[in-house]
Every structure is written in structure tokens, then in C-alpha cells.
């Protein structure tokens, strides 16, 4: 990151200084996100865990096991709460929890499952879903914003569902299991939804992943208010309770079984109509924003897993700073698509805008370019992407995270040079 000795030494001094706490850096980041969300009535908070795989050949770094207990990979576990506005534009991290797993003895999977079922919920990693959601709710409530917690299938857990129900928030959780409805009914949830009235058909845009291309799917929507008898705390717990939720079913109308959409979503929000069901589905679709954030954080110019710092505290500081960079890339990407006419000054500094304009004029030697005096978000995002190697031609699609990350890095050098030039002129 730093090619000058004095800058590199300063960066290491900052990251390794015990007087500078990682919690303080993270708190500043979370509060900035909450402030950015102040104008929103509701904010989607996407809670998801990921792992950072880091090299540790000498075994001297403060790392734990990553992935399967039977693997030798080392790194850190992270639970992120990523806030997104109602229009799908990322706001940033509003909570983040790091931990290093302890090394465990190698044992068969069934033995490990049996042991884990006997552990209290508070000692399990999945409890971090609730902790992170609770922290995010508290921070957003300080700016009078209500959080809607959105979590994928990992949160289809009795303890998590009960805990979310006790928090002051809305929530949407994708179901992983076909649970049995409370007595006197003998049906499962999916059987109950089959007899529920059709609320309508809806077209859903499905984003591209590593295994499938982007496409539009036509789906049928149904909903049903259900009660479950759920045993809390695992199969060995005597404590149980009754949980009432709304289940929203989304089934793709397709003759192909493979990759056909089949979502079952739990929510504490009432759903009585087609538009209501559509709003739940649209809210859940925002969950892909945190997957894109994780990809940008790890690969899209940030390359957080290449960090060579040794101490846990220094790693937290550096990865948190890079999370802010990844957020900026994702915000630019989606603001240019959702609010393209917004002023560029809402996201970029005056020096950054000036250097982008100068770069654009230099590119127009052969074919003169019209550079607006007050560019929009769409303008500067396209210019940053060109700095990163993106080609503005038909069929290429809008700029992505990789080119925006490279462009922002090059822009930072241009802006620094511009600031140095202004400082030199002032001294003269």
C-alpha cells in the first residue's frame, strides 16, 4: 500500500500502537453509517458471517482455525452487519464482531454435533447473529431509524428466531427447515402454504453468482400466518415456546427443476396482500449486497486477506479501515445506478473531482470530450472506472467493483499530487 519508507513506518506505528484501539476506529465507522442513515425511515441491516483466511506458516500470528475443524487453514471469523437504504444503496457497516476459533480435537461429525447441542446458546458462534443485530438496532435507534434485520438460512435457528422476536426491530429470515405447525394442525409449513391463496405473480431479478448467470424469474407468491412449537436451546433443552410468524413462499414458475427458485421467508411483519409479499421478497433480495461487500473487501482492490500484521488488534484495525474502502466502492457502484443525477460532491472531495475532470480533458485529445463543470455521481463513477481500466462501450455493462477499486486507488495518487502542488504554491 505504501511505497515511501516514512509513510510505511507511520502506517505500522499507527496499527501497532496499543494506545490506538480497534474498537474506537470501528465505532467511528459505525456512527458514520448511522448518520448516513438518518434520513431513512427504515434501513435493511444485512447480518452475515464470513472468514478471513490468512497465512501463518510460522504459527506466530494471533489466528484460529478456519473452515472445517479437520482443515489446517488459519485466519479470523467475522460477523458483519451491513446497512442498506430502502433503494438498495449501501450505507456501510453498522456493526462488526471478530473472533479467532480455538483449535479442537479431530472427531467424527456426529460426535461434534452431539457435543454442540449440549452447549448453551450464548457460547455458540451463531449467537453472534443476535449480538450483531442488537448492536446495529441500538446504533440506528439513536438517529430514530428502525432496523429491518435480514439474514439468510443460517439464522433458521430456534434461539435466534426467539431472540429476534424480543428485539425492537422488523426481521426477515430465510427458512432452512420445513417445520411442523403447532397443534392441533398436523401439517408441515410447506403443506400449509400449498393451500394458502395465491397473492399474485411477480418478476424477480436474480443477480449473477459464480455458478449462475443473471436472469429474470417469474414467481408465485403465497403467505400464511403460522405458529410453531419450538424447543429452544437445542434438542436437550426442556425450555420450549410458541412462536408466531408470517411465512412468505416464493416459487418460480418454471418447467426446470434445477436452479428453480424456492424461497421460504419468515418475518414478524404482517402480510395480507400481493404488494405486501412483494415488499418482503424485495427486502430479502438486498441480502446480496453483503455478499458483494465481502467479495470487494477480500478481492476487489482491498485484498484484506493479504495482510501480514501479526497481532489480533492490528489486524482488526487494518481490516476495519479496508472495510470502509470496500463500502465506498459499493456505494459508488450503486449510487451511480440508483441516483445517477446526484451531485458528485456528495461522495467525492473537491480535489478528487478536479483531478478527474483534468484526466477526462487529457483523454479527449483525439476526440474532444465535454467535461461538465458540476459532474454528477454517474459522471464521476464512469471516470473513476476508466482510471481502473473500464472501457465505456456498448455491451460492457456498468462499472463493477474491481475497476472502481483500481480507479479509486489511482485517483488517490492524483488527488495527493494535486494537494502537494497547491501546498507548494501556497508556500511560494
Image (cartoon, rainbow, N blue to C red):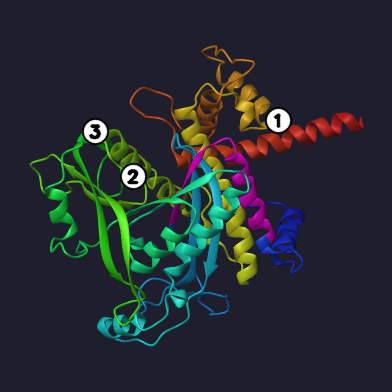
Q: Earlier in the sequence, mark 2 or mark 1?
A: 2
Give the answer, above or below, for where 101 lies relative to 77: below
Secondary structure found at label 3: strand
The crowding category of the residue bearing disc 2, from other C-alpha atoms within 10 Å (few below 14, some 14 to 19, many at least 20), is some
Residue 31 lies in the magenta-colored region: yes
Q: Which residues are magenta?
A: 24-47
Q: Gap between marks 3 and 1, in whole Å?
A: 43 Å
Where is residue 317 drawn, in percent x and y? 64, 61
* Residue bearing the label numbered 3: 203
Q: Residue furthest left?
A: 255
Relative to residue 321, is residue 42 drawn left or right? left
Q: Are marks 2 and 1 in contact (CB under 8 Å)?
A: no
Q: Earlier in the sequence, mark 2 or mark 3?
A: 3
Give the answer, above or below, for where 103 lies relative to 401: below
Q: Gap between marks 2 and 3, in whole Å?
A: 22 Å
Q: Earlier in the sequence, mark 3 or mark 1?
A: 3
Where is residue 96 drawn, in percent x and y? 54, 59
* Residue bearing the label numbered 1: 351
Residue nearest the viewer, comparing 56 with 121: 121
Relative to residue 60, is residue 170 drawn left or right? left
* Residue bearing the label numbered 2: 270
**Residue found 50% across the figure and 32% down from its top:** 335
Total residue callouts: 3
**Residue found 42% across the figure and 75% down from its top:** 121
Secondary structure found at label 1: helix
Residue 290 visible? The answer is yes
Amino acid at each position: 500500500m505504501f511505497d515511501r519508507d516514512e509513510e510505511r513506518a507511520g502506517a505500522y506505528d499507527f496499527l501497532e500502537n496499543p494506545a490506538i484501539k480497534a474498537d474506537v476506529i470501528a465505532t467511528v465507522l459505525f456512527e458514520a453509517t448511522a448518520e448516513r442513515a438518518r434520513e431513512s425511515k427504515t434501513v435493511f441491516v444485512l447480518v452475515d458471517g464470513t472468514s478471513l483466511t490468512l497465512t501463518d506458516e510460522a504459527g506466530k500470528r494471533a489466528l484460529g482455525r478456519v473452515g472445517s475443524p479437520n482443515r489446517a487453514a488459519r485466519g479470523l471469523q467475522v460477523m458483519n452487519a451491513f446497512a442498506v437504504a430502502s433503494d438498495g444503496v449501501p450505507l456501510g457497516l453498522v456493526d462488526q464482531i471478530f473472533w479467532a476459533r480455538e483449535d479442537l480435537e479431530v472427531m467424527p461429525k456426529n460426535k461434534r454435533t452431539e457435543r454442540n447441542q449440549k452447549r448453551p446458546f450464548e457460547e455458540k458462534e451463531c449467537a453472534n447473529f443476535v449480538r450483531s443485530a442488537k448492536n446495529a438496532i441500538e446504533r440506528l435507534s439513536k438517529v430514530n431509524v428502525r432496523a429491518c434485520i435480514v439474514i439468510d438460512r443460517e439464522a433458521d435457528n430456534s434461539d435466534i428466531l426467539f431472540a429476534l422476536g424480543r428485539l425492537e426491530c422488523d426481521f426477515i429470515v430465510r427458512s432452512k427447515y420445513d417445520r411442523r405447525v403447532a397443534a392441533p394442525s398436523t401439517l408441515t409449513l410447506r403443506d400449509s402454504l400449498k393451500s394458502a391463496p395465491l397473492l399474485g405473480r411477480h418478476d424477480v431479478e436474480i443477480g449473477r453468482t459464480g455458478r449462475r448467470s443473471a436472469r429474470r424469474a417469474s414467481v408465485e407468491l403465497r403467505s400464511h400466518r403460522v405458529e410453531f412449537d419450538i424447543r429452544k436451546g437445542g434438542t436437550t433443552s426442556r425450555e420450549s415456546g410458541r412462536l408466531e410468524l408470517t411465512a412468505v413462499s416464493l416459487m418460480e414458475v418454471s418447467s426446470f427443476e434445477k436452479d428453480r427458485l424456492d424461497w421460504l421467508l419468515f418475518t414478524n411483519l404482517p402480510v395480507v396482500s400481493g404488494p405486501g409479499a412483494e415488499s418482503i421478497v424485495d427486502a430479502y433480495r438486498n441480502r446480496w449486497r453483503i455478499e458483494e461487500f465481502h467479495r470487494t473487501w477480500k478481492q476487489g482492490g482491498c485484498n484484506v486477506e493479504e495482510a501480514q500484521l501479526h497481532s489480533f488488534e492490528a489486524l482488526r484495525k487494518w481490516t476495519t479501515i479496508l472495510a470502509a474502502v470496500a463500502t465506498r466502492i459499493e456505494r459508488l457502484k450503486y449510487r451511480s445506478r440508483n441516483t445517477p443525477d446526484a451531485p458528485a460532491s456528495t461522495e467525492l472531495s473537491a480535489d478528487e473531482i478536479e483531478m478527474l475532470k483534468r484526466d477526462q480533458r487529457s483523454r479527449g485529445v483525439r476526440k474532444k470530450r465535454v467535461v461538465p463543470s458540476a459532474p454528477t455521481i454517474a459522471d464521476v463513477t464512469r471516470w473513476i472506472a476508466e482510471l481502473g481500466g473500464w472501457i465505456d462501450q456498448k455491451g460492457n455493462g456498468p462499472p463493477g467493483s474491481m475497476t472502481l477499486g483500481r480507479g479509486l486507488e489511482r485517483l488517490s495518487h492524483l488527488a495527493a499530487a494535486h494537494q502537494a502542488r497547491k501546498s507548494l504554491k501556497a508556500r511560494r
